[in-house]
Image (cartoon, grey):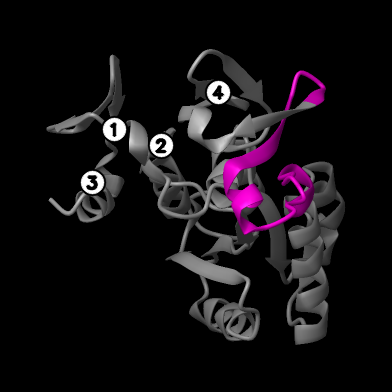
Amino acid sequence: MKLRYIIVDDESIAHRVIEKYCTDLPFLQLEANCYDALQALSLLRERSVDLIFLDINMPKLKGFDFLRTLDSPPQVIVTSAYQEYALEGFELNVCDYLLKPFSFERFLKAVNKAMDAFSRTVVKRPPANADEQERGIFIKGDKKYHQLRLDDIVYIEAAGNYSKIVLRREEIKTPQKISDLEALLTGSEFLRVHKSFIVATSKITELEGNQIRLGKITVPIGRAYKLAVTRFLKL
């Protein structure tokens, strides 16, 4: 399992330091470099990430003001030269607060905290073997865990503060973010086609323009995902 991260900082040297540290951690995957919060907001409208390295003192929009605009923020590690904002950061439920300049050891401790927090949001069924893992997963919903067969899933939709998992005969709402579910559903059986939709590839019946049909259900294809969809379907 990899954590997809972005760096939001107006200083190029901060990006270089974080990227250098992350190259030694194979479970981290860089998604984008954002040099102000507005750029990060634009990116997050098109795709989700699991972790943000966030500076505070930036032009246009401050780091914490940016964080307050997110309805369901991912794990956040603050990287700042200003110690006095630490309390405010933890009140916003950031995972950790790194004071610049920070060592690799301190950085690793923060990343491990983020990894642990992320893992607690995704619960997998302990498989007896590889085939067992492919067939079923556990999903949290309605204060309990539901065992789902992967071949029963038609599509998943992000809906506000929760995700809706549409099965053959029922729907389940879960507080897990769609990005968490995407990380859980690895392999070619599922495809992210929009910031708000993941579809089961075996249920695709038609593709027309910017829409995918799953039987009688129509799902939009996001502009940022169009290329990935066409490549996957070999069009």
Distance Cα–Cα, label 4 vs label 2: 14 Å
Mark 4 → mark 1, Cα distance in angstroms:
18 Å
Q: Position of residue 173 (x, y in %)?
A: 63, 21
The x, y position of residue 176, in whole percent, is: 66, 35
Q: Label 4, on which residue? A: 164
Q: What's the CA distance linking mark 3 and mark 1? A: 15 Å
Q: Quadrant of the N terminus?
A: bottom right
Amino acid type at mark 3:
Lys
Q: What is the x, y in percent for residue 72? A: 62, 36
Q: Nearer the viewer, residue 33 or 124?
A: 124
Dot 4 falls on a residue whose secondary structure is strand
Q: Are marks 4 and 1 in contact (CB under 8 Å)?
A: no
- For the residue pair 13 and 156, the one nearer the viewer reads as 156
Q: Residue 11 or 40: which is nearer the viewer?
A: 40
Residue 153 point in image, percent of width and height: 50, 30
Is 25 magenta? The answer is no
The kind of residue on which mark 2 rests is Ala
What residue range appears in magenta?
A: 119-144
Q: CA distance from mark 2 to mark 1?
A: 7 Å
**Left or right: where does residue 14 sit relative to residue 79?**
left
Q: Is residue 225 above or below residue 84?
A: above
Considering only order in the chain, which callout, 1 or 4, is on the residue closer to the N terminus?
A: 4
Foreground: disc 4 or disc 1:
1
Residue at 28% across / 20% down in the picture? 215
